[in-house]
Amino acid sequence: MNEFIPYGRQSINEEDIKRVIDVLKSDWLTQGPCVTQFESALQYYTGAKYAYAVCNATAALHLSYLALELGKGDILWTSPNTFLSTANAALMCGAVVDFVDICPKTFNLSVEALEEKLIQAKKINKLPKIVVPVHFAGQSCDMKKIFELSKEYGFKIVEDAAHAIGGRYLKQPVGSCQYSDITIFSFHPVKIITTGEGGVVMANSKMLADKIALLRAHGMTRDQEMMTKIAEGDWYYQMLELGYNYRITDIQCALGMSQLKRIDEFVANRHIARQSYERLLSHIEEINLPYQSKDSYSALHLYPIEVPEVHRKKLFAYLRINKIGVNVHYIPVYMQPYYEKLGFKGGCCPNAEAYYNRAISLPIYPTLSTRQIHCISERVMEGLE
Ligand SMILES: *Cc1c(COP(=O)(O)O)cnc(C)c1O
């Protein structure tokens, strides 16, 4: 086997390419019709009322936190088993971040740990303003329970669903925001569908959606209804908030619309890959394959297996030498030097650390062939010997 197999990659077909070329030949490269068409398609797909597409999911998280008025001194909690952005975007708002340990079975934020931490935080008057469940590997967190806790303890919920577009929770599409204030998706090429770079904020509240629309583009508006006085002429605009340039382009959204048509097929193919791995590896005693919850249909962004800690490093190196682009998701965020400087220490989320020490993400993407999965599985078994 000579070709390098990455842990994840995009699938671009001729139709995707044609859609992008059409935009390049049109009048609008950005802020044209494709952005709103893509947003409408995302609303339709998830059932959420509002969608605002932005330049990446990190920006989507930042805007979501700002729209929920996360500011200096406010507290945000999330899972340590996530990409840096989930926590970083809160620091960008001047907030204080803390982490809730994961469930050792799903590797998602543990509802029991969350409840325990809320009880303690209430006693010292340090409840979070926002909790951000991350749908790790594409499998939804237990949103119903988290939603119930939010009512009891008065926090807002942003779902970091960067891994999970195309997934379902209790039969509803992830992104419907049934149990949250906001859901964000990422369209980075390794994720489920891609726009090159890109992300989106989904919400059901008009008030939140309006804030996000404003902050996405410099805090400026041309909408008379939002202005503080009568427009001085057709050229007139007002800046109402300190916003950002977090816009996405029409070129990207044309690709996104074309990709969205293929999303169910992408996710179905990921499940075929999962089944192949299960067939080939479930009998290996040293390996723990990712658990599939009955409450959800995972988008299967990742396929993280666990192996005994003593074998992990050696197996990882063996697979990389054999041109299998395995990866590790994730180093607990608080173990990064930047977070250590903020005062975090090892041991704060023992389940997340134990998982991290055993984890290896095997390749999974829609065009990964059964033959390749056979090769990968063979190498995994050899590497464990
Ligand atoms: C990829 C990812 C992000 C950030 O997405 P970008 O579009 O690259 O900014 C945020 N959260 C999680 C969990 C991710 O995997």
Image (cartoon, rainbow, N blue to C red):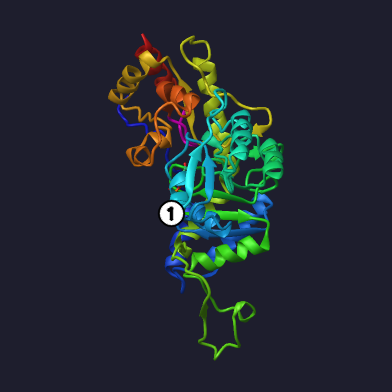
Residue lying at 57% horizontally and 59% vertically, measured from the top left? 67
- In the displayed structure, would residue 330 be above or below residue 308? below
Residue interval drawn in magenta: 363-369
Q: Residues within 10 Å of mark 1 (few under 14, many from 20)?
A: some
Q: Which residue occupies the extreme front position in the image?
A: 124
Residue lying at 61% horizontally and 35% vertically, measured from the top left? 141
| Image location of residue 348, percent across then percent down | 46, 29
| Image location of residue 188, percent across then percent down | 44, 48
| Image location of residue 165, percent across then percent down | 57, 44
Q: Quadrant of the N terminus?
A: top left
> Hey, what amino acid is under mark 1?
Met
Confirm whether residue 379 shows in the render: yes
Q: Quadrant of the C terminus?
A: top left
- In the displayed structure, would residue 24 be above or below residue 153? below
Residue beneath disc 1: 92
Confirm whether residue 370 shows in the render: no
- In the displayed structure, would residue 376 be above or below residue 79? above
Left or right: residue 111 compared with residue 277: right
Residue lying at 47% horizontally and 55% vertically, measured from the top left? 93
Nearer to us in this view, 76 or 173: 76
Left or right: residue 178 compared with residue 290: right
Left or right: residue 69 compared with residue 89: right
